[in-house]
Image: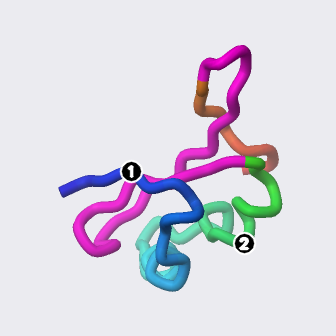
Amino acid sequence: MINYLEREDLDLKKYDDCIQQSIQFNVFGFSWYLNTICDQWGAYILNDYDAVMPVPWRKKVCVKYVYPPFSS
């Protein structure tokens, strides 16, 4: 099952471990990078962190929208 979790609700150890073990490993997916570059972000999580997909977002005039983080 795929769930969306906000940054505050993530298990960051499991999240970063999943990024580290990915065959598409990229520094831009780590929580410390996203915390530095993005004001708000969450992630889609498959099962118990079998796969993750970070989702940086902003809010403008009560509308949330997803954007590519700077330098990624």
The disc label shown at residue 62, or none: none
Q: Is residue 4 above or below residue 36?
A: above
Q: Is residue 6 above or below residue 20?
A: above
Q: Secondary structure at mark 1?
A: strand
The picture quadrant where one finds residue 67 is top right
Residue pictured at 65% horizontal, 19% vertical: 62
Q: Amino acid at mark 2?
A: Trp
> Which is more foreground, mark 2 or mark 1?
1
Is residue 61 a member of the stretch shown in magenta?
A: yes
Q: Secondary structure at mark 2?
A: helix
Image coordinates of residue 47 in percent, x first then y, are 23, 67
Q: Quadrant of the N terminus?
A: bottom left
The picture quadrant where one finds residue 16 is bottom right
User: Which residue is denoted by mark 2 in the rendering?
Assistant: 32
35 to the left or right of 18: right
Image coordinates of residue 60 in percent, x first then y, are 73, 20
Q: Is residue 34 above or below residue 17?
A: above
Image coordinates of residue 36 in percent, x first then y, are 81, 62
First along the sequence among labels 2 and 1: 1
The picture quadrant where one finds residue 37 is bottom right
Q: Residue furthest top?
A: 61
The boundaries of the magenta stretch are 40-63
Is residue 44 a member of the stretch shown in magenta?
A: yes
20 to the left or right of 23: right
Q: Residues within 10 Å of mark 2 (few under 14, many from 20)?
A: few
Q: Residue furthest left?
A: 1
Image coordinates of residue 44 in percent, x first then y, are 39, 53
Q: Main SS type for the magenta part?
A: strand
Q: Amino acid at mark 1?
A: Tyr
Residue pictured at 64% horizontal, 69% vertical: 31
Residue pictured at 70% horizontal, 60% vertical: 34
User: Which residue is denoted by mark 1 in the rendering?
Assistant: 4
